[in-house]
Image (cartoon, rainbow, N blue to C red):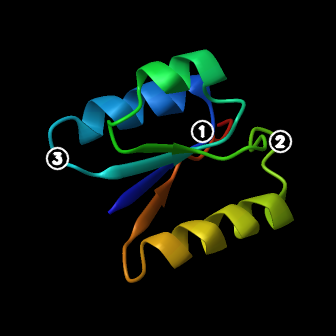
Amino acid sequence: MVFLAITPSGLKDALREAAGSGTAIWCGADAVSEQDFAVLKGKGLTRFSYALGAREQPVLEDALDTIGQHHPDEIVWVEAAASAG
């Protein structure tokens, strides 16, 4: 399984859920600063060089394609925004 975190809070949730399991986590450049990413190095986190927060479909599709190349046959859990009820 792989987590794709879109926001800083989603990244925190993914890191908490993945702790100790070796689950890979990917995130956009806007989910964690370069400095904080450097601190998290070695914790199974990969950071795209571009932002994902706008949730533009082509950008997310490219991100998922890249993840699929690195983690073939893995299920990818994507952070989704809660719908307004």
Q: Which of marks 3 and 2 is in front?
A: 3
Q: Does label 2 or label 1 sit earlier along the sequence?
A: 2
Q: Which amino acid does label 3 sit on?
A: Ser
Q: What residue type is labelled 2?
A: Ala
Q: Where is residue 53 in the image (x, y as percent from the top left)?
A: 75, 38
Tell me how far mark 2 sits from mark 1, CA to CA.
15 Å
Q: Pointers 2 and 1 in contact (CB under 8 A)?
A: no
Residue under pointer 2:
54
Residue located at (60% from left, 39% from top)? 82
Horizontal side of 72 relative to 27 (left or right) equals left
Q: Could you say whether the residue bearing mark 2 is in a helix, strand or loop? A: loop
Residue located at (74% from left, 68% from top)? 62
Residue 32 image label? none
Residue under pointer 3:
21
Q: Where is residue 48 in the image (x, y as percent from the top left)?
A: 66, 47
Horizontal side of 33 relative to 57 (left or right) equals left
Residue under pointer 1:
82
Horizontal side of 15 relative to 6 (left or right) equals left
In the depicted structure, whether residue 55 falls above or below residue 34: below
Residue located at (54% from left, 66% from top)? 67
Residue 74, by quadrant, is bottom left
